[in-house]
Image: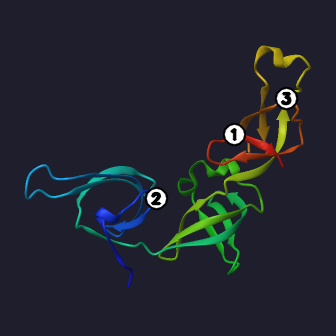
Amino acid sequence: MASLIDAISVKRRSLIEHENVPYTCLEVEVSSPTARGGQTLVRLKMRNLLTSAVFDKTFKASDKFKEPDLQKVKASYLYSDGDGSHFMDQDTFETLTLTEEMLGSATDFLVEGLIIDLNKYNGNPIGLELPPNVELTVVYTEPGARGDTSSGSVTKLARVETGMEIKVPLFIKDGEKVKVSTENRTFGGRA
């Protein structure tokens, strides 16, 4: 049986289950009682891992949560179609499908063969975690001209193979592989 976590013990990035739904904690605020006999309250900003909805809820310090039945499995991206995006579990070789809603903006980084951490809740896929950086090929960028640096702007727009546009240094050319940060969508260097 999963262990129970007191509300007062929940920390940022903790995973909890509330009303049979898995959540990740985004922020924790503890308010101590001002009067004798008052209760300590814990306000949690939580993200629903099934719907990605974010909301605040206040709990008593003694309220208890179960640990959700979450698993992380390594999976490689195969392809996307009308049914969703398909991934292959690296251990069982089972094909797992995530809908567009489950992926969110992760589609901007998905290239064939990319290894990701796929999250499963009660055995069913619910989302994914991208690596910190992804290697993508530049498919189009304006040529950089000498002297462009005098304007103070030393970057130019580049479109990568997934269709996303990022700012890159002037020396990057079409066909080059670049590292792109999945957190802030910025150029991280040549691959």
Q: Earlier in the sequence, mark 3 or mark 2?
A: 2
Hey, which residue is sitting farthest top in the picture?
151
User: Going 71% across and 75% down the picture, which residue do you hit?
Assistant: 90
Q: In terms of depth relative to the viewer, which is nearer, 20 or 168? A: 168
**Residue 32 percent coordinates (x, y):** 20, 53
The crowd level at tag 1 (other Cα within 10 Å; few <14, some 14-19, many 20+) is some
Q: Is residue 107 left or right of residue 60?
A: right
Hey, which residue is sitting farthest bottom in the picture?
1
Q: CA distance from mark 2 to mark 1?
A: 24 Å
Q: CA distance from mark 3 to mark 1?
A: 15 Å
Q: Quadrant of the image for the N terminus?
A: bottom left
**Residue 113 percent coordinates (x, y):** 77, 63
Residue pointed to by mark 2 = 13
**Is residue 16 shown above or below 148?**
below
2 and 1 marks in contact (CB < 8 Å): no
Q: CA distance from mark 3 to mark 2?
A: 38 Å
Q: Which quadrant of the structure image shows residue 160? A: top right
User: Going 84% across and 40% down the picture, which residue do you hit?
Assistant: 139
The crowd level at tag 2 (other Cα within 10 Å; few <14, some 14-19, many 20+) is some
User: Residue 186: which numbered mark, if any?
Assistant: 1
User: Residue 88: which numbered mark, if any?
Assistant: none
Residue pointed to by mark 3 = 170
Q: Earlier in the sequence, mark 3 or mark 1?
A: 3
**Residue 142 percent coordinates (x, y):** 85, 27
Q: Amino acid at mark 1?
A: Thr
Q: Secondary structure at mark 2?
A: loop
Give the mark toward the camera: 2 or 1.
Answer: 2
Q: Is residue 182 left or right of residue 55?
A: right
User: Going 45% across and 75% down the picture, which residue do you hit?
Assistant: 69
Q: Which quadrant of the structure image shows residue 143? A: top right
Q: Is residue 102 left or right of residue 62?
A: right
Q: Amino acid at mark 3?
A: Leu
